[in-house]
Amino acid sequence: MMVENHLVLDGMPAAWVLALVVFPLLLGIAAWAYRRPLLTPLLRRTLGGVRFLLLAGAVFMAFGPQLRRSETREEPAPLVVLLDDSASMERRDTLPSAEAEKLARELNLDGTHPRRLDILLGLLQTQWMQTLEEQYAVEKWRFSGRAVPAGPSLPEGRGVTTALGDALVEILAAYRGQRLPAVVAITDGRSHQGTSVAEAASRLAAEGVPVHVVALGDPRPAPDLALETLQRPEQVLLGEETLFLLKLKARNWPNPGPVDVRLVDENGRTLDQARVSAPNEDGVRFALAHRMETAGFRRLRAVVDPLEGETAREDNTVDLPVEVTARRVRVLYVEGRPRWEYRYLKNRLLRAEREIELRCWLADAGSGFVQEATPGSPPLQALPADSASLLDAFDVLILGDVDPGGLNPDPLFAPRFLDAVSGFVEEGGGLMMLAGPRHNPISFLSSPLEPLLPVVVGREGRRSPTTFRPLPADSEFPHPVVMLDPDSERNLSIWKEAVPMRWSFPVERLRPGARAWLVDPGRSNAHGPAIIAAGGPAPEGRVAWMGTDETWRWRFPGGEALPTRFWKSAIRWLAAGRIRSDQGKARLDLNRSRLEVGQALSVEARLGDPEILAEGGELEIRLENAAEGTRLDPVPGKPKLFRGVFIPTDPGAGRLLLTLSREPDGEPLASASFEAVLPSLEWEVASQDFEALSLLTRKTGGMLVDPTSAQSLLQVLDGSQKRRQTVSSRDEDLPPGWILGFFLSLATLEWLARRRRNLS
């Protein structure tokens, strides 16, 4: 504890007032009092000086002088330790063996390829950090997009981006008015947004705050292979050929060669393999496929072996979870008359009895005609006229070239049936509109089904002036329904070899959210090539448009392979909403299946039967094997609809289960899968930014060290910088005896001098 005394003047004016007004005035008065020419210059200056001191003393007392006694003590200075909490901390670097062994020994790490986050957390437990905490008031901050006080929490490496410059500027602002001896940053230096490191370094240097850096990561750009998922199904049927579309990127690989990518199951068994030629930074698309012969939740993965010297191996694998359902798609095919398309399509679906349960309704058949159906399924006696009956019995409805008014002698049946079909789609059913020259879509325009179509159609059909071959709308990235071969070039070749068609119904354009499957590249309008087939959501189910009735021609020259594969794929796609749930009792939808860690996933649950909640409880979503769930809130005015948000915190494939809060461990009502990936900005360029860190330390006068040399920072951070804190302070009046003695002495001196010189 130290005691310091300071003289304070509460009433003292500004310095310029003293210099320009008070001092000249006092000096003038003193000089004027001894202006007589009889006095010698020496005596005049002496007596004038005494008078000036008397006047100055009086003015001084008018300023209210007091003696301030302060008690102060020295404390350790504040020291900020800035910890990188961005996703690049999940990176594992290939370190030299000597450095890896030293790190493992000093930081108590397991393995020779620790994460940067493991090194950072290890540094916080070393004697080096303990010494800093003994010598300074260490205050830890975490940063990714911004800097926040760490408190008791430790970095987790979850930040979706890094702004090192912003973090340093925020630290400077938070400690403005205090003297920071230094900032110690433990980071890889990689920054993607915000204030540049150079600008932040200039501002810190201007404030005299050095930045010392413990640099994590390897500054050398290492070769990297990265797999990405472009398209994968969430649910498939037992026995279905399942297609996965992926992309392989190669970075910092000067001599790219062919790379093999494998599709493996839960036991590491290879199911399929693709050879990707010369991958590059933009990525090369390819496909893997496998026929699912085992029901249940399958955890498949795509794997590519790492390159020599590759450090970022986390992106060499992508998870491809898929739910395999062991049930048949229930299809109702309504047709007017037995045209060629009906005959061949009906027979094709009847033969697929392992995967499809078909029941037909031929409107032009006689009264004694037995409607056709899959063996073992009862033939229809009448068409269902309400959506509940359709939902209870079917997953997909195919409407062919049929007049709605001819489905039943009752004139009120047609509008009831169309309303039922609309409700069927709204509740998750699939609808295929199969065009014909007589009634479809002409007879359905201005009906409840027209706004459900994925296309805006013309008003009349026409025969093409020339034959045409429908081709995939996107030859490189075709829709799964028209992906007949995993290789996009071979797939396009199959479609080019199909027998030409002669008739299609004109389409003006796609509706929002829909996607073209097949187009006629020889015809186009202002919106693009003529659309032959398309599909899209509408609203909870799916609706497809087939603008020709000549798919039976695809039997030539390759037989049934092309049309069978197409129609099975189309029906499975249409039934996806129903397959995702237990025959429509509940359904769980995600706004996307692939997202970055930390991003919000919008979740929507739809109950087929609201009575599920009649016994109390709430709907929850929970990660598979997780202990706690997240509640879903009901949507006002829609008793079957519930919504919520889920934020994944860990990378990898995840599966959300829809459960009742009263039965958290019971059978889930529905499920949905997603894939959480590390943020792209954090992962694409994740090597240590040695240049930025060097500039930062050089400009601010700090030191740049690696984790094995962090101890050397104690040479400059030796605790000699202290912070003084005032414990108490009080003001006291000046001793009156001293003041009175001062004035009497000067006054007596002047009086004696004036008497001696006979001055009045």
Image (cartoon, grey):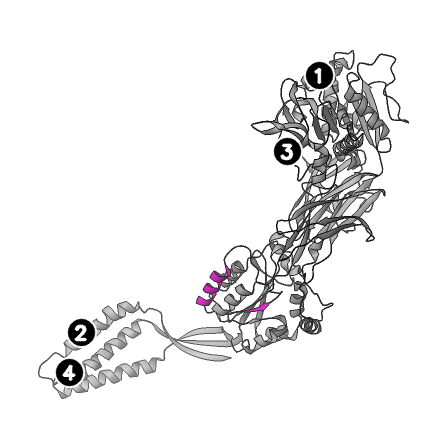
| Residue found at x 54% / y 75% | 75
Numbered label attached to residue 513 = 3
Q: Is residue 538 visible?
A: no
The mark closer to the camera, 3 or 1, is: 1
Residue identifier under label 4: 44
Q: Report the Cα–Cα distance between label 3 and label 1.
A: 26 Å
Mark 1 vs mark 2: which is more N-terminal? 2
Q: Report the Cα–Cα distance between label 1 and label 2.
A: 116 Å
Q: Position of residue 78 (x, y in %)?
A: 54, 70
Q: Report the Cα–Cα distance between label 3 and label 2.
A: 92 Å
Q: Position of residue 687 (x, y in %)?
A: 61, 61
Q: Label 3: state its secondary structure.
A: loop
Residue identifier under label 2: 28
Q: Quadrant of residue 509?
A: top right
Residue identifier under label 1: 439
Magenta residues (range): 192-215
Q: Is residue 198 magenta?
A: yes
Mark 4 neighbour class, 10 Å CA radius: few under 14, some 14 to 19, many 20 or more? some
Q: Is residue 415 visible?
A: yes
State whether residue 573 is above or below residue 735.
above
What residue type is disc 2 on? Gly
The residue lying furthest to the left in this view is 38
State whether residue 705 is above or below residue 451.
below
Q: Label 4: state its secondary structure.
A: helix
The mark closer to the camera, 4 or 1, is: 1
Mark 3 vs mark 2: which is more N-terminal? 2
The mark closer to the camera, 1 or 2, is: 1
